[in-house]
């Protein structure tokens, strides 16, 4: 059985951050650039952290429920395909995109990339919640 506490907390933190911004959407557009950057940075950080936990929990679940070593040597794309086969995730292509965005954040900070991740954070939040729900339902 997997201890999902850290994933629950990460998904919830991302959702709270996005909800905070959504509730202030009209005011958000009027913020100074420095303030927008702070909120965008928070979303990007939550995206990064939650993404990392998501794929690691996918791998752990697959290892525990298929066979030990079943994910050894798999690329991230192969891991996502296997997770989809096991009904942990629904949209493999979306997870490929989240992986690409995560890779972009680890090389350099760029405001255009940050904006792209900011835009992808809401759909990712839903996808990470769906993964968490699937893991919770099948965590035996």
Image (cartoon, grey):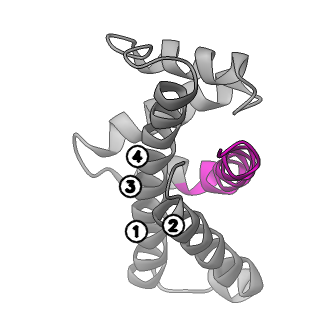
The magenta region covers 118-140
Q: Which numbered mark, 4 or 1, is in the foreground of this view?
A: 4
Which residue is nearer to you in this view: 48 or 44? Answer: 48
Distance between mark 1 and mark 3 Cα atoms: 10 Å
Distance between mark 2 and mark 1 Cα atoms: 24 Å
Q: Which numbered mark, 2 or 1, is in the foreground of this view?
A: 2
Q: Which mark is residue 52?
A: 4
Of the residues under marks 4 and 2, which one precedes in the sequence? 2
Residue 39: x, y in percent?
Answer: 48, 77
| Up/down of 55 relative to 19, above or below | above
Distance between mark 3 and mark 2 Cα atoms: 32 Å
Crowd around label 3: few <14 · some 14–19 · many ≥20 (10 Å): few
Residue 104: x, y in percent?
Answer: 35, 37
Label 3 sits on residue: 111
Crowd around label 1: few <14 · some 14–19 · many ≥20 (10 Å): some
* Secondary structure beneath label 4: helix
Q: Is residue 119 magenta?
A: yes
Of the residues under marks 2 and 1, which one precedes in the sequence? 2
Of the residues under marks 3 and 4, which one precedes in the sequence? 4
* Secondary structure beneath label 1: helix
Q: Is residue 75 magenta?
A: no
Determine contact: label 4, label 2, CB under 8 Å. Answer: no
Left or right of 104? Residue 24 is right
Of the residues under marks 1 and 3, which one precedes in the sequence? 1
Query: Residue, x 69% and y 57% (percent of image)?
Result: 122
Label 1 sits on residue: 41
Q: Answer yes or no: is residue 29 visible.
A: no
Residue 26: x, y in percent?
Answer: 75, 84
Determine contact: label 3, label 2, CB under 8 Å. Answer: no
Distance between mark 4 and mark 1 Cα atoms: 17 Å
């Amino acid at each position: 059985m997997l201890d999902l506490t850290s994933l629950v907390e990460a998904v919830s933190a991302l959702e709270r951050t996005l909800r905070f911004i959504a509730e202030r959407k009209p005011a958000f557009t009027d913020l100074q650039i420095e303030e927008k950057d702070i909120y965008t940075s928070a979303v990007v950080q939550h995206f990064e952290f939650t993404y990392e936990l998501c794929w690691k929990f996918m791998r752990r679940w697959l290892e525990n429920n298929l066979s030990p070593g079943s994910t050894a040597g798999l690329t991230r794309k192969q891991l996502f395909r296997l997770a989809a086969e096991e009904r942990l995730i629904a949209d493999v292509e979306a997870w490929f995109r989240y992986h690409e965005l995560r890779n972009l954040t680890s090389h350099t900070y760029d405001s255009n990339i940050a904006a792209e991740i900011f835009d992808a954070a809401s759909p990712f939040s839903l996808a990470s919640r769906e993964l968490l729900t699937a893991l919770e339902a099948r965590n035996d």
